Amino acid sequence: MKKNPLLITFTMIITLFWSCSSKQEIMEKRLKKFISYYEAKAIPLSREAALTSWNANISGTDTDWVSSEKAAFNLAKLYTDTKALSELKKIKVSGLVQDPILARQLVLLYDAYLAGQVDTSLIARRLKMETDINKKYSSFRALVNGKELSDNEIENLLKNSTDSKELQAAWEGHKMIGPVVAGDIIELVKHRNVIAKNLGFNNFHEMSLKLSGQDPAEVTAIFDELDNLTRENFILLKGDIDTYFAKRYRIKVSDLQPWHYQNRYFQEGPEIYPVDFDTYYKDQDPVKLAAAFYDGIGLNVDAILAKSDLYEKPGKNQHAFSTDIDRAGDVRTLDNIRPDVYWMNTILHELGHGVYSYYNDMTLPFTLRDAAHAFTTEAVANFFGRLAKDPDWMAGMRIIDQKEREKIEENCRKSLRLEMLVFSRWAQVMYRFEKSMYENPDQDLNKLWWDLAEKYQMVSKPEGRDMPDWATKIHIALYPCYYHNYLLGELLASQFYGYIKANITDNMSFIGEKPVGEYFKNNVFMPGTRYYWNDMIEKATGEKLTARYYAEQFVQ
Ligand SMILES: [Zn+2]
């Protein structure tokens, strides 16, 4: 009897289907087994690293720093396991893991283990080079007219002096760190490229972005979009800035030099529309204000504040940060609160990070209980931090009265706009410089730096200058390939703002707006890192990350 060909095909399909799905099951089971093994190790190790670092930042004692370094090392060691990586690689290459929650964990775990595969001697050499450079930055003091000045003193001088000669001396004095570290940095950049090439990347910049889940082409496209959206307006604004400074220093606009912009890098908006925010906050309690505000939008922060360390102490870290100790509700912030606008902004900012961690989805597996990306939590923090200088918010929180609000409104808007535009042009320089430097560290970097500053910040190079001014920016040496995230965070903060304005409320002080808290909780915090960051943004705002809303908010 002849077999029915249709029946054969049908049986084949069934068999194929059965074997596929069972293969899939087997592979997913294998991954689940790996994840249990991983979590049993990673959960206690990360908790220990976070806790010991927290303690060291508060006490500042050598013993606490030693414990913190040890715990950080133990956590990092977990990811050096080559057997674990080869198991993950086999599972990944099979392409059989279909369950979205498992598949996402596979991507993140694979990248984490891949990043851990650098030869320990290469890591040790990198750390040694970084420590040596760090020491040179730390011990450097600018020599200005025979006097040694710290970075803060240089910044103060640049901000307040109106004497062009003194400004030039301060700016040039500070730039003398450049030749001290430039050679070491180029060597370090080449060493980082060796590390990247060993892991199969073209250079360290590409590796840093890819292993943190960013596609360099995607980031560059956003920077190009932002450049196009801000260029025309920045030219106009730069004209206003230059007119203001020419008058301030009693010189011609054409004689303005980089030292005339009140800052070492022209990275902050100069104070050309003055509003004295500190006077409004001098009798306020920033913690109480922030707690009341967050409670009003349905994101109570009492549990975070109860575990936090809020005020100055001897030996304590002088800055501020937020930390998620266990991804299970132990969230804290370290601050050094004073009654002024800086700390009002900072506590709103840090609690923005705090609520992102605290209100995550506890039913997600450990690996996914994290922000979609470092810059998405920065975006939420910036979104709330900006309120400290928002006259509507200040009036709504009864920090100022309506009359005062009307008086300062225009200048507040203008100075925020200036701040944002100036920062965005500066971030372009940083991003493009780092990208190009890692692509070719042997090029004329002094020229590259000033070409970019002229193009994006529209600041001209002092005539005949050929110095490694790029090497004076510590981030380039010691916090590599991260700076662009600050700008992406600002863009996303504006995208949230635009979405909320169009869809949730027109009360843009957000005071008492529970739907705003609800929106963030459901669409940004709860998803954790279960989606690629740009997919999370698309789900939360209807669009992928775009510079349009930032331009809408600050360029018009
Ligand atoms: Zn932050």
Image: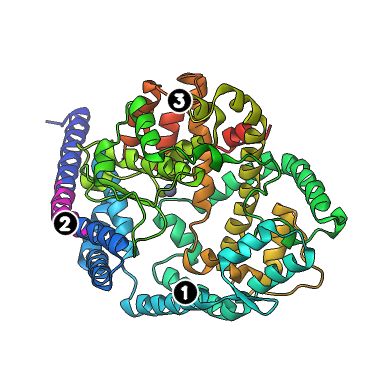
What residue is pinned by disc 3? 510
Element under label 3? loop
Horizontal relation, residue 387 to residue 115: left or right: right
The numbered disc on residue 126 is: none
Nearer the observer, 459 or 174? 174
Label the magenta part by its dominant secondary structure.
helix
| Vertical relation: 486 (above or below) 195 | above
Instruction: Identify residue type, mark 3.
Output: Phe
Residue 267 at x, y percent in the picture: 62, 54
Q: Alpha carbon of mark 2 to alpha carbon of mark 1: how far?
A: 31 Å
Q: CA distance from mark 2 to mark 3?
A: 38 Å
Q: In the image, which residues are magenta?
A: 29-45
Query: Dot 2, crowdedness within 10 Å: few (<14), some or many (≥20)?
Result: few
Q: Amino acid at mark 2?
A: Pro
Image position of 21 with respect to 485: above or below: above
Location of mark 2 (residue)? 44
User: Does residue 387 appear anywhere in the picture?
Assistant: yes
Query: Within 10 angstroms of label 1, few (less than 14), some, or many (20 or more) residues?
Result: some
Vertical relation: 532 (above or below) 141:
above
Tally of marks: 3
Kind of element beneath mark 2: helix
User: Which corner quadrant holds the C terminus?
Assistant: top right
Q: Is residue 520 visible?
A: no
